[in-house]
Image: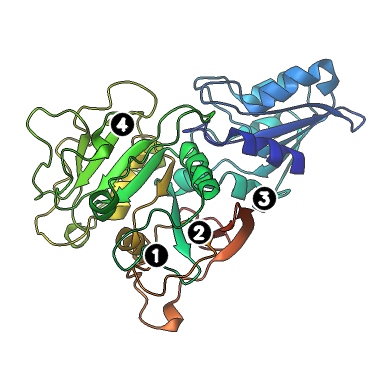
């Protein structure tokens, strides 16, 4: 199973909106006969790839798979039936599929006499598939907040300059992580201060441009901003009462109206994962990214008036999920990062720390809703890696992945 988890990781950045999955086939004598992973959305699933490699050696053997084999027909057929046709005698599953549409593969296999075991290396398999499992269980994208800072926690000098705190090696590593995400998000403060492109560097193997999302409550994005350069699809998230910042006839970005945080009534019409349609609004893979993006149910999410408050980020994330955005890479600056933390919407933190000191200047994180030490946001550290002269720390916000409320 450890090898299957390793294989699954190879699909990061290319399988969305599907999960990453790895599979290893052992023959009846316990020897490795085949292995595979899901490489891209619409392509063969991990079980199919591994079974093709195993051939007749799979008969009477065991399949180790990181996610329960699907039992439905989508762009490909059900993996449960492929395993049955191959004569597999035993299937070991790390994590059950949480989606009603695809689940049921284990039950079908058992009905046909296949021995099925579940839970082997479940924590490792959940971690490698954290983005998709968050999306499937909660109906919102998985959020990774990235920041760069000095050892004393400063993300900019006292005069506002910040280019560059970290090394070229660290910045190249950031582009690699950007390319794996479905969307790169920043707040209007970052757009006004730094005028970033929010793109992944050309030449990275994944190839498809992530959606750029600007959280702009009051409609202040300049028409000359580089996020409107047409290099990648862009979505501006505005409050219902905000002016349209784009000139008449401008098709440089889609617009999404999201209520301010204090204006959102609590209602049950926000879709769960099962209701997520394909690419309504700004598409991820080709198509026309420049039309105005509106919700499936009509209107523009105008659930309330008011002004001066930040957007309801949870609702924004659900709307992105409806556009098949499975993962968000948040680079938004201290104010937006603090808002995400206050609303409980950060799943992973990636910090690049430079061996440098500023002493004054902007902190990496703004108000995160903590007034006393009892409210501190404690993280679980998963990895510390040296990148050039800098350190990259990766941590998650809890010991286990979130699960859908029952």
Lateral position of residue 371 relative to residue 166, left or right: left
- For marks 2 and 1, give the CA distance: 10 Å
Residue 106 seen = no
- For marks 4 and 2, give the CA distance: 26 Å
Mark 3 residue element: helix
Where 394 falls versus 97 (above or below)? Answer: below
For the residues bearing labels 3 and 4, Cβ distance under 8 angstroms: no
Residue annotated with mark 3: 124
Q: Residue at x 21, y 30 (%)?
A: 252
Labelled disc at residue 351: 2
Say which label, 1 or 4, has the lower sequence index: 4
Lateral position of residue 106 relative to residue 51, left or right: left
Mark 1 residue element: loop
Residue annotated with mark 1: 364
Q: In this orientation, which residue lies closer to the viewer: 230 or 108?
A: 230
Say which label, 3 or 4, has the lower sequence index: 3
- For marks 2 and 3, give the CA distance: 22 Å
- For marks 1 and 4, give the CA distance: 27 Å
Where 405 falls versus 169 (above or below)? Answer: below
Labelled disc at residue 233: 4
Q: Residue at x 16, y 43 (%)?
A: 222
């Amino acid at each position: 199973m450890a090898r299957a988890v390793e294989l699954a990781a190879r699909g990061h950045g290319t399988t969305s909106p599907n999960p990453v999955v790895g599979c290893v086939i052992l023959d009846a004598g316990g020897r490795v006969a085949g292995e595979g992973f899901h490489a891209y959305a619409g392509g063969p699933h991990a079980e199919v790839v591994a079974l093709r490699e195993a051939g007749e050696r799979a008969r009477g053997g065991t399949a180790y798979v990181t996610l329960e084999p699907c039992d439905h027909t989508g762009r490909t057929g059900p993996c449960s039936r492929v395993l049955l046709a191959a004569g597999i005698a035993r299937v070991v599953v790390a994590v059950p599929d949480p989606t009603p549409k695809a689940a049921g593969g284990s039950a079908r296999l058992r009905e046909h006499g296949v021995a099925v075991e579940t839970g082997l290396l479940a924590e490792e398999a959940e971690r490698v598939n954290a983005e998709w499992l968050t999306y499937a269980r909660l109906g919102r994208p998985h959020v990774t907040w990235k920041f760069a800072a000095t050892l004393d926690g400063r993300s900019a000098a006292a005069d506002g300059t910040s280019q560059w705190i970290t090394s070229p090696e660290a910045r190249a590593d950031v582009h690699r992580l950007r390319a794996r995400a479905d969307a790169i998000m920043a707040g209007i403060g970052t757009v006004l201060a730094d005028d970033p492109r929010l793109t992944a560097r050309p030449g990275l193997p994944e190839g498809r441009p992530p959606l750029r999302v600007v959280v702009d409550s009051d409609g202040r994005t300049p028409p000359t901003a580089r996020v409107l350069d047409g290099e990648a699809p862009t979505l501006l998230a505005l409050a219902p009462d905000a002016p349209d910042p784009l000139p008449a006839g401008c098709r440089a970005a889609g617009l999404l109206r999201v209520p301010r945080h204090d204006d959102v009534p609590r209602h049950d019409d926000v879709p769960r994962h099962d209701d997520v349609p394909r690419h309504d609004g700004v598409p991820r893979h080709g198509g026309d990214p420049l039309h105005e993006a509106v919700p499936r149910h009509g209107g523009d999410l105008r659930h309330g008036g008011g002004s001066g408050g930040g957007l309801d980020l949870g609702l924004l994330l659900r709307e992105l999920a409806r556009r098949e955005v499975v993962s968000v890479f948040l680079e938004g600056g201290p104010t937006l990062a603090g808002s995400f933390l206050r609303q409980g919407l950060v799943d992973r933190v990636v910090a690049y720390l430079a061996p440098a000191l500023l002493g004054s200047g902007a902190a990496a994180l703004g108000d995160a809703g903590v007034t006393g030490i009892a409210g501190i946001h404690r993280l679980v550290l998963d990895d510390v890696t040296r990148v050039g002269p800098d350190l990259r720390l990766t941590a998650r916000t809890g010991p286990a992945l979130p699960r859908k409320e029952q």
